[in-house]
Amino acid sequence: MYVGYFDSFYDLPQLNKHLRCHWRAYYPAKKVGIKAPIAAGKFPLILTLNLPADCGQILAAAGNIVCQLQFPQRHATTPNDYPQWLAEHPRLVAANKQAVKQSLLVIEQLLSPHQINSAPLQAHIRPQQVGACGYGFGGSVALELLRRSHLIMAASGATSYLASQKWASPCEQPQLLIQSPAKPGLSPIFKRARKRAYLYTTPQLTPAKLTTLSRSFFAASFAHQPFDFAQLF
């Protein structure tokens, strides 16, 4: 499948200082290249957070419209006791909350029929099939988005933490949690999931690994099918 792309932005007056949020879209296209005509049909929408360009291209080639956002990467120790850890990282929690707000506003704009900047995409998005996929700090944001918004159907995150009081929420939506054995910060979240949660622990916690797993995870989740990552490796 061919992949097209273009760069754009949204002005978000709802946030402090009237933030201008830049983003890049990748999408199934009739030919390769910038501003290539989008392919006929409707496609799921995946918001990617802190992932490199090639990951967006891979997800778009699999039949998704991809909107890429980038936030400053934020590192932290791995939580052992989540309530205490959150209390010790107020700036990280605040940054996570702000990034979640920004991401939700972007999704709302993407789905809006009155938004000029994303008009070429809007008619091709399946609003009932929206996912979030993030790496590092972006993974924390993606997992909280799933817990905050009814617009998000599924989320995948490769990270060592979820910087939110929502960490203990018994989420019922499909979620793919990817962590390293040295930093198992997502295990407590997996234990509190009611259903459709998948925990993958790997020493190679890379954007490429996240993308490979997420491509199949979102396809299964959007089709309301179980996800079996054992078949991928």
Image (cartoon, grey):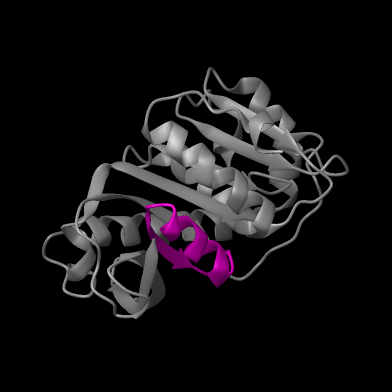
> Which residue is drawn at the image coordinates 63% and 50% (left, top)?
210
Question: Which residue: 69% across, 44% down?
Answer: 86
Q: Is residue 10 visible?
A: yes
Q: Residue at x 85, y 39 (%)?
A: 181
Q: Quadrant of residue 103?
A: bottom left
Among the 4 quarters of the image, the one containing residue 134: bottom right
The reply, left or right, for residue 26 in relation to residue 160 is left
Residue farthest to the left, as pictured:
114
Q: Is residue 74 above or below residue 160?
A: below
Image point 71% across, 35% down: which residue? 200
Tell me, yes or no, if residue 143 can be seen here: no
Magenta stretch bounds? 50-70
Q: Please indicate whether residue 185 sits to the left or right of residue 189 in the image.
A: right
Total numbered labels: 0
User: Residue 156's x, y, as percent?
Assistant: 55, 43
- Is residue 55 toward the left or the right of residue 147 in the image? right
Residue at the right extreme of this rendering: 182
In the image, 65 versus 97, the foreground residue is 65
Q: Quadrant of the N terminus?
A: bottom left
